[in-house]
Image: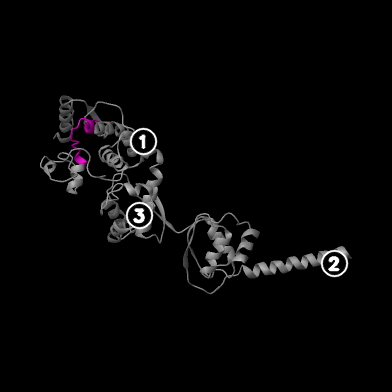
């Protein structure tokens, strides 16, 4: 009889507990037609997530949310991200969304070699930003990264540092959020070892990224990157003007196939046909391979390069003007042969 009574009591307790559970999982407002966007930060546990949901009126009590999360196996599975939720969703529905990984994100890709202006044009064309706000945020925003202290003042300070990559961002990301994400990626890519290596080479971090940007603009294939880097370093050591066409195009603010002699006569601090040494800063955003090439140039005596007379994008390299002129004639004959 005692055992039977205990069983009945346990069954009653369990039934009462289940009734309680079903009552707390109900939606806050089953008739609601409104939605809210919430952001769950990285590393947030059930308690923090519950507080966020309660703050937005999506659940009634954080403790109940923690209980249901644990009971139904969702504990430790909550995902970070931005989610669109409604007070009409019951707690189980909320938990399914929050553990599905289907956050409200959108993706964009910035290829290697774009300038800040062209990056802004691409992002605006794809509906991610307002270019005017983006450029203002670049000029006036404050960003907490180690490399910032090495950058020059002025509205062009982030040229070369909006790291080319594919990014997933929240749908509500602002212009400043996007900039911050791209700068954070650069900070992640340019590791402490690179600062040491730059110093060993006798260059600042800014100068290394400037060299990397020249490599990025000039190299069409991976095999050429360390070789072009060697030409740049060899010319700097002679010293000899770099005479890199990509810097002239940057100075002109144009993109075209052929740089004319009159183009190289422009008076501009980025025209490396006239100025000695490196330009004042990067001319585009280099990718990881170009940065590594700038830090690890091939050991050669090359001081010239010119495209091969084919469509591979590779270059011929030369140590003297005679070979350079020969390679140049071969390329021009190939390129402009009617």
- Which residue is tagged 1? 197
Q: Which mark is residue 179?
A: 3
Please check the rendered image and state whether residue 281 is part of the magenta-colored stretch, yes or no: no
Residue at (69% x, 69% y) in the render: 19
- State which quarter of the image contains the N terminus: bottom right
Residue at (57% x, 67% y) in the render: 90
Q: Position of residue 27 (x, y in %)?
A: 57, 70
Q: Is residue 139 above or below residue 282?
A: below
| C-alpha gap between disc 1 and disc 3 | 27 Å
**Label 1: how many Cα within 10 Å (few below 14, some 14–19, many 20+):** some
Q: Which residues are magenta?
A: 234-246
Rendering quarter of residue 75:
bottom right
**Label 3: how many Cα within 10 Å (few below 14, some 14–19, many 20+):** many
In the structure shown, which secondary structural element does the residue marked by tag 1 occupy?
A: helix
Residue at (30% x, 27% y) in the render: 299
Horizontal side of 334 relative to 170 (left or right) equals left
Please check the rendered image and state whether residue 238 is part of the magenta-colored stretch, yes or no: yes
Q: Position of residue 3 (x, y in %)?
A: 86, 63
Horizontal side of 2 relative to 16 (left or right) equals right
Q: Nearer the viewer, mark 3 or mark 2?
A: 3
Q: Earlier in the sequence, mark 2 or mark 1?
A: 2
């Amino acid at each position: 009889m005692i055992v039977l009574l205990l069983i009945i009591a346990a069954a009653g307790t369990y039934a009462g507990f289940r009734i309680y559970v079903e009552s707390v999982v109900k939606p806050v407002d089953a008739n609601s037609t409104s939605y809210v966007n919430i952001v769950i930060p990285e590393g947030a546990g059930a308690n923090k997530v519950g507080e966020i949901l309660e703050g937005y009126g999506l659940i009634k009590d954080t403790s109940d949310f923690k209980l249901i999360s644990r009971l139904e196996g969702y504990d430790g599975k909550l995902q970070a991200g931005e989610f669109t939720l409604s007070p009409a969703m019951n707690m189980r529905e909320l938990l399914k969304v929050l553990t599905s990984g289907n956050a409200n994100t959108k993706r964009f890709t910035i290829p290697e070699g774009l300038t800040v202006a062209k990056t802004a044009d691409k992002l605006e064309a794809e509906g991610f930003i307002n270019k005017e706000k983006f450029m203002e945020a670049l000029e006036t925003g404050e960003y907490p990264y180690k490399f910032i202290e090495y950058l020059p003042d002025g509205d062009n300070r982030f040229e070369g540092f909006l790291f080319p990559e594919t990014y997933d961002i929240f749908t509500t990301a602002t212009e400043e959020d996007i900039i911050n994400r791209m700068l954070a990626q650069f900070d992640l890519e340019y590791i402490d070892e690179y600062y040491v290596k730059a110093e060993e080479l006798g260059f600042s971090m800014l100068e290394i990224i400037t060299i990397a940007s020249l490599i990025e603009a000039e190299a069409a294939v991976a095999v050429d990157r360390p070789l072009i880097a060697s030409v740049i370093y060899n010319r700097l050591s002679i010293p000899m003007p770099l005479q890199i066409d990509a810097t002239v195009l940057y100075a002109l603010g144009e993109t075209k196939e052929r740089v004319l002699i009159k183009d190289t006569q422009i008076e501009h601090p980025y025209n490396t046909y006239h100025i000695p040494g490196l330009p004042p800063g990067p001319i585009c955003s280099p990718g990881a391979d170009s940065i590594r090439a700038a830090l690890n140039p091939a050991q050669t005596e090359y001081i010239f390069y010119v495209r091969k007379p084919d469509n591979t994008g590779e270059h011929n390299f030369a140590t003297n003007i005679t070979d350079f002129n020969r390679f140049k004639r071969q390329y021009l004959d190939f390129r402009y042969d009617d």
